[in-house]
């Protein structure tokens, strides 16, 4: 580049081509190709939006690295029309990726930080994802009004998956969460009529759940 606009689209294509070596689900890759990550991060960070790293988004929070969003989207095995609950809207990027796969009107996201929730709502609307529903509140309670969900995921680490969220997912549905405090494991839970089956997907590092206890 010679002082002009950085070619974000080209950078994004390159990033997703690299991610395609680790994730082969076409819908996930198409979603990552479609969502302009640079529009979700603070202006001062835009230049780094297509590096595969987390970035600060204000309020001491971070947007996950693109490969983590890809892995999570892939593990949830989402399809068009699936109803999805997200806990931790942050800047809204991950919600937009999910919206690309299931349709924006099927995404319900809860964010603890009032300013983050407000900004995410605006960014999502500006970029054509205005049908994503964002609620300012404590995601430990889930969002009962729109239950049951086909899938739920946490973008912050939980000491254990909150019962309310398990209750709000239908039988056969999936829940994905970083579980732990300092050291966390990415756990995929399948809710069945008899209880919950767990699958471990390795060590991860996410910001921890906010709340008063
Ligand atoms: N998916 C986000 C990542 C945000 S980081 C993105 O694409 O930007 C995790 C987010 O979880 C933070 O925004 C944090 O404020 C939020 N969070 C933490 N505890 C929460 C809680 N109890 N309820 C809802 N959101 C919470």
Image (cartoon, helix red, strand yellow):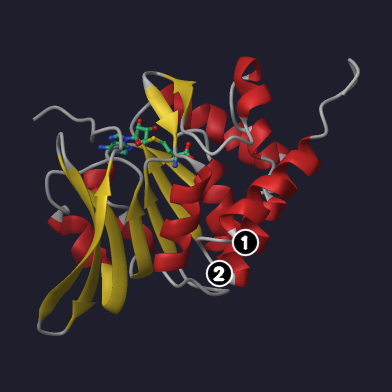
Quarter of the image that includes the C terminus: top left
Where on the picture, by quarter, is residue 71?
A: bottom left
What residue is at 24 percent from the left and 33 percent from the top? Answer: 208
Q: Which is more toward the observer, 119 or 157?
A: 157
What residue is at 74 percent from the left and 39 percent from the top? Answer: 11
Task: Say left or right for 101 vs 209.
Answer: right
Quarter of the image that includes the N terminus: top right
Q: Is mark 1 within 8 Å of ligand 1?
A: no
Task: Say left or right for 35 vs 8.
Answer: left
Circle 2 — which element?
A: loop
Residue 62: x %, y % from top left: 42, 29
Give the mark toward the camera: 1 or 2. Answer: 2
Task: Measure the alpha-carbon separation of dots 1 and 2.
Answer: 7 Å
What residue is at 61 percent from the left and 32 percent from the top? Answer: 40
Crowding near the residue tagged with mark 1, few <14, some 14–19, many ≥20 C-alpha atoms within 10 Å: many
Q: Which is more toward the observer, 151 or 27?
A: 27
Q: Which is more toward the observer, 210 or 75?
A: 75
Q: Are marks 1 and 2 in contact (CB under 8 Å)?
A: yes
Query: How many labels sit on residues?
Result: 2
Circle 1 — which element?
A: helix
Q: Give the residue at mark 2.
A: 24
Q: Which of the two labelled residues, at mark 1 and mark 2, occupies the earlier sequence position?
A: 2
Where on the picture, by quarter, is residue 153?
A: bottom left
Task: Say left or right for 31 vs 137.
Answer: right
Looking at the picture, does residue 70 appear above or below residue 138?
below
The answer to whether residue 165 is visible is: yes
Ligand 1 occupies quarter? top left
Q: Give the residue at mark 1.
A: 29
Task: Say left or right for 87 vs 37.
Answer: left
Residue 131: x %, y % from top left: 61, 52
């Amino acid at each position: 580049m010679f002082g002009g606009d950085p070619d974000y689209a080209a950078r994004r294509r390159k990033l997703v081509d690299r991610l395609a070596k680790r994730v082969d689900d076409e819908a996930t890759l198409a979603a990552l190709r479609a969502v302009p990550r640079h529009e979700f991060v603070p202006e001062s960070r835009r230049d780094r939006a297509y590096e595969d790293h987390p970035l600060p988004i204000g309020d001491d929070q971070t947007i996950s690295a693109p490969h983590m969003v890809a892995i999570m989207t892939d593990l949830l095995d989402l399809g068009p029309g699936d109803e999805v609950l997200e806990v931790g809207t942050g800047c809204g990027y991950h919600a937009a990726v999910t919206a690309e796969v299931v349709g924006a009107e099927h995404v319900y996201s809860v964010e603890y930080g009032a300013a983050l929730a407000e900004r995410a709502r605006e960014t999502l609307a500006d970029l054509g994802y205005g049908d994503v529903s964002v609620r300012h509140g404590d995601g430990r309670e889930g969002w009962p009004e729109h239950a049951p969900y086909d899938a739920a995921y946490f973008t912050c680490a939980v000491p254990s998956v909150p019962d309310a969220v398990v209750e709000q997912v239908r039988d056969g549905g999936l829940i994905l969460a970083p579980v732990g405090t300092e050291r966390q494991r990415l756990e995929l839970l399948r809710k069945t009529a008899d209880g919950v089956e767990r699958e471990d997907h390795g060590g991860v590092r996410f910001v921890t759940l906010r709340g008063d206890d």
